Amino acid sequence: MIGETRVMLEHAGDPEQRTLAGYRKHGGYQALAKALREMKPEEVTEEVLKSGLRGRGGAGFPTGRKWKFVPKTTKRKYIAVNADESEPGTCKDRQIMENDPHQLIEGTLLAAYAIGAETCYIYVRGEYPHSIAALENALDEARGAGLVGRDIMGSGFSCDIWVHPGAGAYICGEETALLTSLEGNRGYPRLRPPFPAVEGLWKSPTVVNNVETLSCVTHILRRGAAWFSSLGCEGSTGTRLFCISGHVKNPGVYELECGKFTLRELLMDLAGGTPSGRPIKGVLPGGSSMPVLTEAELDVRFDLDSIAKAGSSLGSGAIMVFDDSVSAVDVALNISQFYSHESCGQCTPCREGSDWVRLMLDAVRRGEAKTKDVALLLDVLDRIEGNTICALAEAFCWPVRSFVRKFGAEFEAHVAGRASA
Amino acid sequence: MQKLATVNLTIDGKRVGAKPGSTIWEAAKEAGIDVPVLCHDPRFEPVGVCRMCAVEVEGARVMAAACVRKVEEGMVVRTASEKVERCRRMLTELLMSEQPEISPKDATTGGDKLWALAERYGVEVRLPRGNSRPDDLSSPAIAVHHQACILCDRCIRACDEVQVNEVIGRTGKGYAARISFDLDNPMGKSTCVTCGECVAACPTGALVNKPVAGDLKAATKAVDSVCPYCGVGCAVTYHVDEAKNRVLWVDGRESPGNQERLCVKGRYGFDYALHPHRLTKPLIRIKYPRGPLSSEVETSHGHRRKPGGVVDYAEVMPAFREATWDEALDLVAKRLSEIRDRDGPGALAGFGSAKCTNEEAYLFQKLVRTAFGTNNVDHCTRLCHASSVAALLEMIGSGAVTTTYGDIVNADVALLTGTNATSNHPVAATFFKQAARSGTRLIVVDPRASGISRHAWRFCQIRSGTDVAFYNGMMHVIVEEGLVDEEYVKKHTTGFEAVKAKVKEYTPERAAAICGVPADVIREVAIAYGKAKAAVTYWGMGMSQHVHGTDNCRCIISLALMTGNIGKEGAGLHPLRGQNNVQGASDAGLIPMVFPDYQRVDNAEARAKFEGAWGRKLDPKPGLTVVEIVKGALEGRIKGMYMLGENPFLSDPNTNKVRKALSNLEFLVVQDIFLTETAEFADVVLPATSALEKDGTVTNTDRRVQVMRPALKPPGEARLDWQIICDIATRMGYPMRYRSAADVFDEMVPLTEAYRGLTHGNLGPTGKLYPCPEPEKSDGTVVMFGDGFPTADGRAKFVPADHTGADELPDKEYPFILVTGRVLEHWHTGVMTRRSMTLDAREPEAFVEVHPDDCARLGVDTGRMVTVSSRRGTISLKVRKGTHTQPGSVFIPFHFREAAANVLTTDKLDPFGKIPEFKFCAVKVVPA
């Protein structure tokens, strides 16, 4: 039987955990105290590197390596916490921010100490007023206790943390757009290189880490890299938060160790299968921007690398399930509607292409497209992908292409009005 | 990492060596490989958004945008593979599917880059065309077709990075994204200044010129010339329909000066030349007694017949009859000769113009000095930088700028004082604003918070007329802080002790009490200036047009000298010249005390040289200046005058006095392109040619001598100005014969040391900065006086100055300070610009700018008519509420005849420069 391994959400049910006193009761800020007193900044980075922690925002980049890109010589550096949780189906970071915000603050301070940043911004999705309030309260308490601000715990290390609410644009969850937005400009992704770790906020080195990633850092420093890497499996160490939604009996946020079960086991045992009892038709295993996996592909082992090998990704940890009552064309159209609405409009292929794809899928759905249009659609997707500043174009190209390829018959049936009513 | 001299890569199978740090696009271009782009323009920071330039880089997962991707050693690039071409075709199709049926560029300037790509790829649009995006036609000059916009960001970068106006942005996201103006206002209601840089940058038909009417399919001829407006002297290209004799549109041209940039006047102000009011036949007056003819001019207040506008021809023309050239010229020669022979040469005078070419200025002063036999020749330089030139000649031995406006890029501090550069030198201002963006600290000193103050590091809003106190305060701090460049002072100057002693009296506290800028700020800016590695000073008429104008300039020259800020990159003195050829007209000797090249008429050696060259005995006595000549006319000592392109009725101080003076003349001949307010007083009016119809050279504020070329044929019987001058001189007994303007230039150059070696032929497409000893090889000299000054002892001379204050201070009866000046859209007396559709539409009427506090006190608001009176006259005009002026001051631009600011101004002069105090007089404001 599959069970949760709760680390980040261990005390999530306890309202006291939101307070400094409650957090301290379970070892809160001991990791920070230890790091500030006993460890050099490089040692903190080393510990994170050893733990095998990979970013939890979607790309899965090794966190310690990212920190190591930060030039040592530059004076001004920043941490930007990506709390703009806006990938459809994703709702894990808010569990941390609303139920146990201090672990994020502690992790942020540890990261700041490791790279030498004195200012951190938590960029929170504007639609998360509760998260913003919880973080502000926690920060007030931490500041009052000398845990945030000047000369933290008498260590000589100073670091302030600011909460910055977003204004509703999906694209601001993209790390460079987040930085542009923080600077007060329109949230436009930036060209890379330079990468933010080298040239980020106000042209200074900036580490952008996800809420869950930094929360893991707290636990790594508290209990050690060896303990952390003993959880999960190689390539997917520690625990991860997953948000299961759609046609399952038990939707919700689960904290799991990867590599211990298959995707089918996860969906059938833990999530309870479909409420209708109808077969699962498809799963988007990592948010709406990832290629769909069909029922036949569900026996893949549930970890980063295995899912990647199966042609999809665990992305932001949002697992969306739909049963066979759902039309593949509808899902593809829904996804393209979202991304064409959220395209920042900067790059031609994405701005023009996302809308064109939306219109074409709509034509397919209404039975107004022709057979050659489906081929044209795939051709357009191929031209768009990999030809933009950020990955938003991929975010609709990948799933839409996977739907056309994997459910081709349905698309065929729709064209030229041959769809069943 | 080892720094490589070149990066070796392979592009399309070709081995290419590229500069480190260059992009693939640049490397390809060097190698002669054209990678198509839509969003990229080398003048802007690349953004890599159109993706048209995406190329394959071997080993990379995805394609790279060539405009942003830097070259790397050993890189293998394919710019035209099947994959790349398919991608471009698809992008072009996606973009074309949203384009309007025809490109709006088809009817304006042509050159739609997207449509050219569509043609190249033979794109057949397989997608339904959209047409949901609107047009914005609210600007008088620019049409915005959102449907044709591909969001390439070029206009945004042109507005932000090049012109630094920061008006254009974006709104909406995804497919609904659009360019927007300010907070998504219509363009015509935004802070857009209509410079048209966005239009020039736009690769599609999204931003196009509105005024262009005509058939582009007619073969257009490109004529390279120079903008006729301000001293920045922008290189332009006129696109001309020769058959219809029309200019279709204007482009800024690549030049070391303006670098393709233009302002609203340069880009949209050319249509005055085609205005139906152009004079086409000589006119002889039939209605006497001589006096003003139109009601706007007749009375100084009330009786406004219609809002705005120009001289009413219907009202004025009946006073004249048309004549043949021979008749008119004979009459002019006869009457002027009579006066000369009867009352002596001193009874004649001539006003030349800084709007004319060097050749015309040279011939005009030659005519006055030979055919008239007097040195009574002057021009509008008297009204702008005479005091600057007086101070510069006195202290450093040269009146020209010591460095260019573009040199600000090399300065770490720039002092901008008394200059409303964003309005009066808009293209130079773009370089100032750009410098501010990239870290040059701008210290802006001005009683008015004009446009450039927004870009200031520190804006010092001094009280009007307190410049000397402010700068003495600054110099006090520099001495006190030990920031004097002792070595420079010792090596290159004399008289420092006198200035040092003088500024000792001006503690920052004392200066602050006088000028109103806090002592701390005076300290701060003085220290910044004093510590700068290179500090440059640009100034305008806010410094010069005072009774203490020369003292003002002495101060900033002393400031530069004591800190060693002359003669090196990014440092120097630059009085921003007003007219397109005020530098050249002065160089050519259109000044009463000097021959060409500032050789004094009372210097026997110089006189002998010119007597030899011109074959006439010359008057050793310096002539009268502009205001002195007017006074002479009023007193009956000056009886005959020849005005070439000047309109003193509106441009000179104390209009009512000018009116009497002009009426009092025995004979007045006016040579101009329109019937001006001054021409209303004329006995003979000669139809001349506009800047768009003539060739000749003009010298800009940087000392850049450039060739103007004719784009249009003159209307009717209008003739070239230099030929008219020659005909009058010849008829007055001093034969002048030249084959061409170039011929005149060739006579002038040997007499004008600064221009040595220059010919029309070797000035090239973008001119030369004089001195330019090797015009075939070099662009000329940017920085002057690195090793001493053109003075007798080779040293600059410090001259101390004391704060004296303005001539006419406000009192109970006249409680406001009047500051006059200009607006972006208009040129001087409005003769040209008020006949330009775009410029007139943007700024159609006179106004007085009043501070909100004063508005409240007076009970007036924007749009309310008021009368403004001084001891000399009264005008009526509308209020414009604004915070540019300080409480207690009002500002009136002097372009508007129906409310001529110079009715109010005082003709009190600076004793050295003989410049009137346009920037200060006392007035009262009364709600009408």
Image: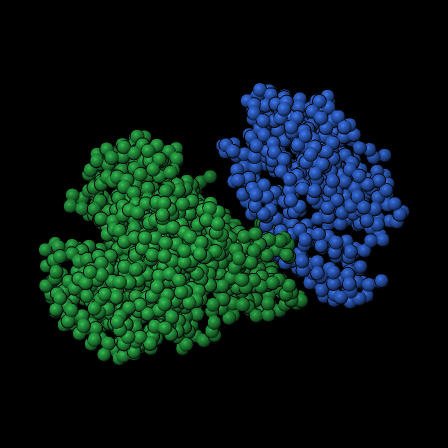
Chain colours: A blue, B green
In this rendering, is residue B47 above or below B346? above
Q: On the image, which quarter does residue A87 sit in? A: top right
Relative height, residue B692 to residue B826 (above, below)? below
Q: Is residue A212 left or right of residue B142?
A: right
Q: Residue at x 26, y 62 (%)?
A: B660
Is A5 on the left or on the right of B419, as rendered? Answer: right
Q: Position of residue B923 (x, y in %)?
A: 36, 50
Q: Quadrant of residue B437?
A: top left
In this image, B907 relative to B858: left or right?
left
Q: Quadrant of residue A420?
A: bottom right
Residue extending farthest right? A277
Asked if residue B104 lies left or right of residue A124, the reply is left
Q: What residue lies at 39% left-to-right and 41% top-to-bottom?
A: B460
Instruction: Choose between B771 and A281: the one closer to the eye.
Output: B771
User: Which sits in the foreground, B625 or B252?
Assistant: B625
Image coordinates of residue B777 in percent, x first then y, are 28, 57
Nearer the observer, B652 or B770? B652
Report if residue A156 is visible in the image. Answer: yes
Q: Is residue B203 visible?
A: no
Give the residue displayed 19% in from the left and 66% down from the top: B639
Residue B831 picture location, percent across and down:
36, 65
**Image location (x, y in percent) of residue B260:** 41, 58
Q: Quadrant of the C terminus of chain B?
A: bottom left
Residue with the most extreme front position: B813
* Residue displayed at 24% across by 68% down: B668
Tally of numbered discs: 0
